[in-house]
Amino acid sequence: MLDELRCESCTSSAVALGAEERRLLLTELDGWQMLDRDGIPQLEKVYTFKNYKLAWAFANKISELAEEEFHHPSILLEWGKVTVTWWSHSIKGLHQNDFICASKCDRLT
């Protein structure tokens, strides 16, 4: 299971996952989609909540996870909604770390 793995150090010399590797790892995630922004593949999911305070608490949990894994997503906090986007900035693409962290986000709900 992806959520049982730890992120590895990802430097600019790391290799981004290929399309087939990304597709296979995506099948292990629930409700995540792969997007392409400015030629950079990214993983994204929108979580919904009953109010702003619950969404805020979840965004804080994601921030704590990011610090634990030393891998940081984009987090958009709105009333009743948190959008989380993972990609590896140093390689301008997706790494296994992104899928690990996406899986760990789902554990936090």
Image (cartoon, rainbow, N blue to C red):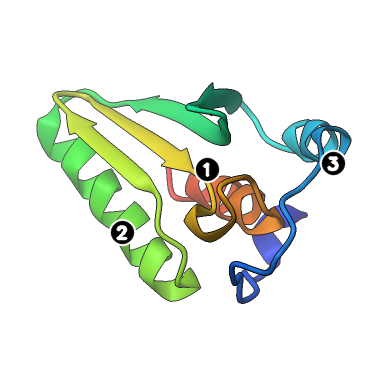
For this view, does 9 lie left or right of residue 60? Answer: right
Question: In which quadrant of the rendered image does the N terminus lie?
Answer: bottom right
Residue shown at the point (12%, 31%) measured from the top left: 52
Q: Is residue 46 above or below residue 74?
A: above
Residue carrying label 3: 21
Residue shown at the point (14%, 24%) measured from the top left: 79
Please name whichever residue, 15 or 79, is drawn nearer the observer in this view of the structure.
15
Q: Give the amino acid type for the residue marked by disc 1 in the picture.
A: Asp
Tag nearer the camera, 3 or 2: 3
Residue carrying label 2: 63
Q: Where's residue 104, x and y in %?
A: 55, 53
Please name whichever residue, 98 or 52, is drawn nearer the observer in this view of the structure.
98
**Disc 3 and disc 2 in contact, CB within 8 angstroms:** no
Q: Give the amino acid type for the residue marked by disc 3 in the picture.
A: Glu
Q: Where's residue 3, x and y in %?
A: 65, 57
Q: Is residue 39 above or below residue 108?
A: above
Q: Where's residue 96, x and y in %?
A: 71, 55
Q: Where's residue 9, x and y in %?
A: 61, 76
Question: In which quadrant of the rendered image does the C terminus lie?
Answer: top left
Label 2 or label 1, whichever comes before in sequence order:
2
Residue carrying label 1: 106
Please tell me in which quadrant of the rendered image residue 6 appears: bottom right
- Distance of mark 3 from mark 2, alpha carbons? 27 Å
Label 3 or label 2, whichever comes before in sequence order:
3
